[in-house]
Amino acid sequence: MLDTDVVVTGVGVVAPVGLTPEEYWAALLSGRSGIKPLRRFDPARLPSPLAGEVEGFEPRDHLPARILPQTDLMTQYALYAADRAIAESGFEPVSPLDVGVITASASGGFDFGQRELQHLWHDGPDHVSAFMSFAWFYAVNTGQISIRHDLRGPVGVMVTEQAGGLDAIAHARRKVARGTPMMVTGGMDSSLCPYGMAALTRWGRLSTAGDPAAAYLPFDRRAGGHVPGEGGAILTLEQGGAARARGARVYGRIAGYGASFDPPPGSGRPPALIRAVEAALADAGIAPADVALVIADAAADPGLDAEEARTLAAVFGPRGVPVTAPKTLTGRLYSGAAPLDVVTALLALREGVAPATANVRDVDPELPVDLVLGDPRPITGDAALVVARGAGGFNSAMVVRR
């Protein structure tokens, strides 16, 4: 029989507004934004100069010098977050086979890849780093975390864009339910380099606003795209009974998960997000009325926002549940967004408060969504829903419980 009591015992956060869960949570409650003009390179040729860049992270302060030449910044973030999560869990494996790693990535090591392609173009193949063979790859975070901590349990990577963070956590949850004592999981992305920004611009969903307070406005009548960001979160999952028996700190439980895939454009069939949400609630064994808070995907695209709002209204009733989108303070973190939203949901349930959706002032009255605006809102209940959608039709939803 599967052990469905799978809990979170450690958290590592890298976000534009903080490098610990405490810093991140304090920023959400105060409304402190990490969206600013890009500093990593000159953004003059971009549609908008804005991004959610991580501040105050110095890799040499956290990682051995030998690791730095072989890793992209994305991987350095992931290693730091994994170090924090594993240390906080306090888990001591009997064997390296006791712990596995499953992460998500939407872009891989774009900055590393761009740098080495420039070396190839300007100087020739002899000047390309041998580490290029893996530093750009989607699975590199899984591999580097496994190597650093000598973890030889189940491994994997999910590449389903923003939905990937939930997909990775769900896959790790299954491994724990089937007997693996602990899994390290989550998502991390960083594509704020010219190569990455060129790809994102080509996608066509970036905001062109130059004012940080008006650039990322999901569900707002002024919505015109999202702001890119970087970072994410890494979690440790364990069997609940074993974690409590050894006195581990438990953030909460991964209670339910659902996924679906949208039909192709032009098919005439409706979007499938509702199937993911209903499957997550059914997997958790709860009714819609049991959900205290929804953390939205929050695309800030009028059509996608309307789809999400209609889905939530169909499940919970029009304006039937508080909804928030903390991404307006960090930007869209791609595969890192949903794991960070899971952390937000766990902290919101623990503290009994939902952070507000910053900067949104004019919610489209046609959208039947109860968006938390202005100040944080008290909530009661022990379950929250996280929604994530990935480019190309991926939908995922996850229920966490206090």
Image (tube, rainbow, N blue to C red):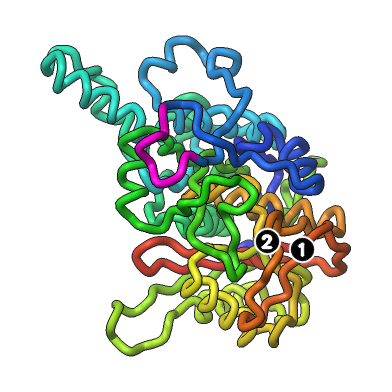
Question: From this viewpoint, is residue 237 visible?
Answer: no
Give the residue at x 75% y 41%: 27
Q: What is the spatial separation of the Cα atoms under label 2 and label 1, in whole angstroms?
A: 7 Å
Residue 67 percent location from the top left of the image:
43, 17
Residue 131 percent location from the top left of the image:
28, 22
Q: Is residue 5 left or right of residue 277?
A: right
Give the residue at x 53% y 80%: 274
Specify the quadrant that holds the N terminus. bottom right
Give the quarter of the image for residue 287: bottom right
Circle 1 sits on which residue? 373
- Give the extent of the magenta segment: 42-49
Give the quarter of the image for residue 117: top left
Magenta segment's dominant SS is loop
Specify the quadrant that holds the C terminus. bottom right
Vertical placement of residue 157 versus 268, above or below: above
Give the residue at x 14% y 22%: 121
Vertical placement of residue 391 versus 72, above or below: below
The amino acid beneath tag 2 is: Val
Give the quarter of the image for residue 183: top right
Q: Callout 1 environment at 10 Å: few (<14), some (14 to 19), or many (20+)?
A: many
Q: Is residue 162 magenta?
A: no
Circle 2 sits on which residue? 360
